[in-house]
Image (cartoon, rainbow, N blue to C red):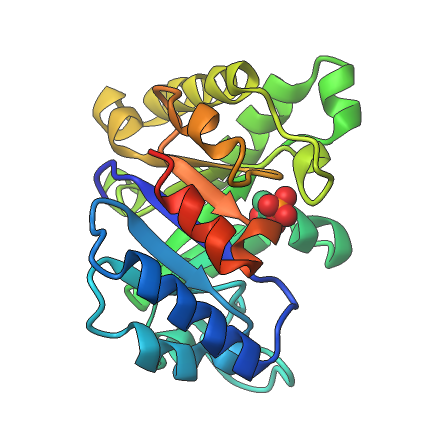
Amino acid sequence: MSRQKIVAGNWKMNKSLQEGKTLVQMILNQVNDFDEVTKIIIPPFTYLDSINSQLSKKENFFLGAQNCHTNSGGAFTGEISANMLSSVGCKFVLVGHSERRHYFNEKDGDFVLKIKEALKNNIQPIFCIGETIHERKTDNHFKVITEQLTNVIKEFSIDDFAKFILAYEPVWAIGTGETATAQQAQEMHAFIRGVVADIYDSNSANNVAILYGGSCNAQNAQELFKCKDVDGGLIGGASLNADDFCKIIFSF
Ligand code: PEP
């Protein structure tokens, strides 16, 4: 995907089906015809089909999933494959989210397999990377980001990489109310483009959309989105409120 403005809302394990449908309707009422920004709604698995019906045929609104399995199908009780996601209209999937890394012990090798499954099913990965507070305080954040990114993207061709969206999500900012400053976000996003340029080329680096995630909200989105290398946001908490989410969409 070439570079575009994107706001993605990751609901995580929140909302009932009815609450989710109401939230989507409220968002559609406010931003239905605002097509300059790509909007991605990422609800829990069980609501995907229903929310797909609300989003289908809406200008520049897409459905995303929070996870997919490393395999395409079979005896994996409780799991969901990319193929299944595709069958309910998903166009995007989160891979490498810090909550998957930390609570579910997912590793680089898992992310490679998940992204391969996603791409096979025409689903674009939103690949998340980010350092912990300890890694930042010990001045290891650039090294950690380089490793998280390189270990995964080196397994993909330049054509496959063109379908990636990246999300820089410092772990210390996720759900904490502590946001990276615009300078910290810009510095890291520019650095990430440099790593991509080293692995592929400058065209790939310039074309990849890089989202910022980590307590991005209606108050700070504008400051963050002004940064030259920040192409939008991956929004957790603030995506659960229609007014806040819409203000973020209008923040470019
Ligand atoms: C996230 O989970 O991707 C996220 C950015 O969460 P929050 O906005 O709540 O920090």
Which image quarter holds the C terminus? Answer: top left
At 55% from the left and 40% from the top, the residue drawn is 217
Viewer-proximal residue, 207 or 31?
Answer: 31
Viewer-proximal residue, 147 or 58?
Answer: 58
Viewer-proximal residue, 17 or 231?
Answer: 17
Residue 31 rendering spot, x and y as whole percentages:
30, 56
Q: How many numbered callouts?
A: 0
Viewer-proximal residue, 29 or 231?
Answer: 29
* Image position of 144 (left or right of 29): right
At 38% from the left and 36% from the top, the residue drawn is 251
- Which quadrant would residue 213 be assigned to in this image? top right
Q: Is residue 205 above or below residue 83?
A: above
Residue 119 rendering spot, x and y as whole percentages:
33, 59
* Image position of 25 (left or right of 145): left
Residue 11 rendering spot, x and y as whole percentages:
57, 62
- Which quadrant would residue 89 be assigned to in this image? bottom left
Q: Is residue 38 above or below residue 23?
A: above
Which image quarter holds the N terminus? Answer: top left
The reply to whether residue 163 is in sight is yes
The reply to whether residue 156 is in sight is no
- Which quadrant would residue 177 be assigned to in this image? top right
At 39% from the left and 72% from the top, the residue drawn is 25
Residue 135 rendering spot, x and y as whole percentages:
74, 23
At 56% from the left and 17% from the top, the residue drawn is 184
